[in-house]
Amino acid sequence: MKSLRISAVLAAAIFAVLPARAEDWTPEPGFISLYNGKDLTGWGYRDKEQKVLETFDGKTEASDGRYTAKPGILVVNAHNAEKGPRIRQLWTTQVFPKNFILKIEFRAAVNADSGIFLRKPQLQCRDYLVAGPYKQLKKYKAQDWNTIIVTVKDNVAHCECNGEILEDALKIPETGPIGLEADRDQMEYRHIQIKELP
């Protein structure tokens, strides 16, 4: 009887630390998912003029290995000098000309440096307390999942992390895609969802 109780407790503990399966998550009402949880469909590389250079529909890894699709998680991999440039941006193939709310969860390795591009300008997304620039955040959870919410209205973005303001009025262009940056060390993104506003 005692071993049965220990087994039940052990099973519950294992289940608690296992990641949720990709199919267990669905976007909130009115939102659409920008990451399907299984491959890089809808994402690609663009040039400086924002023209699509390469798309990764149906692929689980970008051509240079900087981005990998894992179940439910889009991984930004550490740089490998033999495979490509140190800094790389992955963009949605879709553009977003309307007002919108973007919600994205991220987990940063120690001192990791990444970013979220809003049509074109970058919102720094990092291991904030070590890499900055928002070192005064009180609710940031180091090496754990954090939530960024970006509300865009009339080409101005209000950006928060776990409810704390990162940027109150970041000016952005009238239209453009959403992007993620690969710079330093590993980052993970999940639950990437967007809701266009009237």
Image: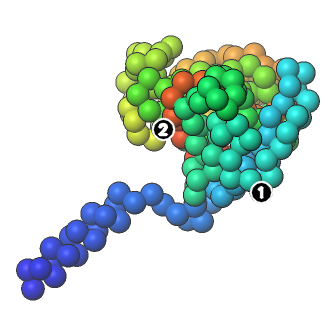
Secondary structure of the residue carrying numbered label 1:
loop
Scheme of image coloration = rainbow
Q: Quadrant of residue 94?
A: top right
Quadrant in the picture for the C terminus: top right
Residue 100 seen by the camera? no
User: For residue 107, which numbered disc appears in the image?
Assistant: 2
Type of residue at label 2? Arg
Give coordinates of residue 13: x percent, y percent.
Answer: 27, 63
Q: Earlier in the sequence, mark 1 or mark 2?
A: 1
Q: Assess disc 1: are there few (<14), some (14-19) or many (≥20) residues with their C-alpha within 10 Å of its C-alpha.
A: few
Secondary structure of the residue carrying numbered label 2:
strand
Residue receiving disc 1: 58
Residue 24 seen by the camera? yes
How far apart are the two marked residues, 1 and 2, measured between alpha carbons? Answer: 24 Å
Quadrant in the picture for the N terminus: bottom left
Q: Quadrant of residue 149?
A: top right
Q: Residue at x 22, y 75 (%)?
A: 8
In the displayed structure image, the side of residue 51 where residue 39 appears, left or right: left
